[in-house]
Amino acid sequence: MASPVRVNRYRCLVAEVLPFRALHYELASVGSLTDVTAPPYDVIDEAERAGLMARSPFNVVELDLPVSPEPDGDPYARAAELLEGWLLSGVLTQDREPTIWALTQDYTGPEGGSKRRNAILARVRVTDYGPGQVRPHERTQPGPKQDRLDLTRATRYNLSPIFSLTTRDAWRHVEPVTAGAPWAEVTDPDGTVHRLWPVTDPEVHDAVTGELAGSELLIADGHHRYETARTYRDEVGGEGEHEFTLMALTGLDDPGLTVFPTHRLLTDLDSEGLARLREDLAGPFQLAEVPTGADPDPGGLEATGCFGYVDRTGARYLLELRDPGTLIDLMPERSDAYRTLDAAILEKVVLEGMLEMTEADVEAKKGIAYSKSVEDAVTRVETDEADAAFILRATPVEQVRAVADAGETMPPKSTYFFPKLLSGMAFNPLS
C-alpha cells in the first residue's frame, strides 16, 4: 500500500503527478532488460511474439499479450499467475520507496536525422476528459478497451505506460540524474536506445509534482488504456492506487518530440473500382502526375488537403483539394482544426464520399490497412498486397492539440508518435 505522503496537497490541482512504488524486473535475475522488454502489445503479431519469447521466458509479452497454454484457457488469468510467480521467484521486485523514472530515447526517425526525446515515468491521477484535465485526440474502439480491462482486472497492474504530452515541462528537474550511468539501457529493433534512471529524491518528486500541477495532459498514445483506467477506477470505487495510472510524460516543447504520418492502403478494390476511384478523385482534387519511379510524397506541399496517390495500375499522382471552402459544408459541426486535418479530409471526401465506407468500416479495418513509410506503402501496392495507397503528411503537434482543445477526437491512425515506448520498463501497482 503506497504512502499517502504528499498526495492530498495536490488533490485540487489540475494534474496530480506522483512517484510510485514500481514493480520492475530484477536485472540480476534476467540478465538484461533488452531480453524482457517488448514493443506495445497492439503492434505485435504472432511471429514477433514468438521471437520475443525466444529471447527470454520472462519477456513481458507473456503478461501484456497473454496466451493461455490450454485451448479454452483464460489468458488473463494466465498473465496474473505468471506475474505472481515471477514476483515470488525474484524475477520481479517491488521498490520500497516511491520513485519516478527519467527516460531518454535516442532515435533516428523515418525521415532520417538523430534526435533525443525525454520523458518522466510517473503515476497520474485518472480524471475525466475536459479543459484543464486530460485531453484525448483519437477515437477508440470497444474491442481493445475490453481486452485491456480484462487484463487490468486480472493483474491489478499497469503493465505499460500511456504516452502523454504536457503543456508544462518538468524534465529540467530530473535531467541532472542522467549525467550518471543509467539503471538500464535497451536498444530496440528500430535502433532506438532507451535509457532509464530511477529518481528517489523526495525534493525532486515535489518539484515534478508542483511543475506539472498546472499542466494539461494530452494523450499521444494509449487512448484505450486510459479509458480502461477510467472504467477500472469507477468499477473499484473509493480511494486507492486504482485512482492512478502509469504515464510517460513529455513536454510539448521537447526538442525530440516529432509526429510522423500513417499512410492509408485500400485492400478491397477491383479494376472497375480503381478506375471509378481515379475518375471520382478528379472532381474535388487537382491531380498532378508523378513520374514512374518517383514517390508520390506530399510532404513539401502546404495547401489544405494534399495527398499522394498510387495504385496497382501504375498510376501516381499528387492530389490537392480544389476548394477547401467545401469542407465547412461537409463537416459543419466540426472545428476548423478538425476539418483541415488531412486524415479527416481523406475520411470524409474519399473513404466516405467516394467509397461509401462507414466510420465502423474504418475502425474495423474493413477494406483499409495502414503503413508507416512511403516506401513500404508503395511497395505493398506494387506487389499487389494493396490495391491503392494514399500518402499523408504528418499532423503538426499544434494541430493535434487544437483538435483536443475543441473537444474532438481524430480518425484512427491520424498520428504516429515515434519512437514507441517499451513495455516492461516498470509496472504500476493498482492495489
Image (spheres, helix red, strand yellow):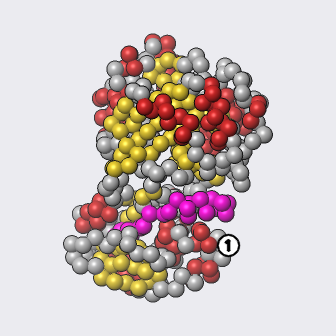
Residue drawn 35% across the image and 42% down it? 192
For the C terminus, the quadrant is: top right
Q: In the drawing, does residue 46 fall left or right of residue 158?
A: left
Residue 164 seen in render: no
The front one of 6 and 425 is 6
Give percent across and percent down for residue 213: 69, 42
**Which residue is rendered at x = 55% and y = 62% of the image?**
398
Against 223, residue 78 (above or below) is above
Circle 1: element type: loop
Q: Quadrant of residue 230?
A: top right
Query: Is residue 395 in the magenta section?
Result: yes
Q: Position of residue 30 (x, y in %)?
A: 37, 20
Q: Is residue 267 left or right of residue 403?
A: left
Image point (47%, 19%), residue name: 92
Residue 106 against residue 262 in the figure, above or below: above
Residue of label 1 = 333
Q: Eyeballing the image, is 31 above or below 390?
A: above
Total of numbered circles in the picture? 1
> In this view, which residue lies farthest toward the left?
293
Instruction: Note whether residue 261 is visible.
Output: yes
Q: In the figure, 274 relative to 164: above or below?
A: below
- The magenta stretch is 388-409
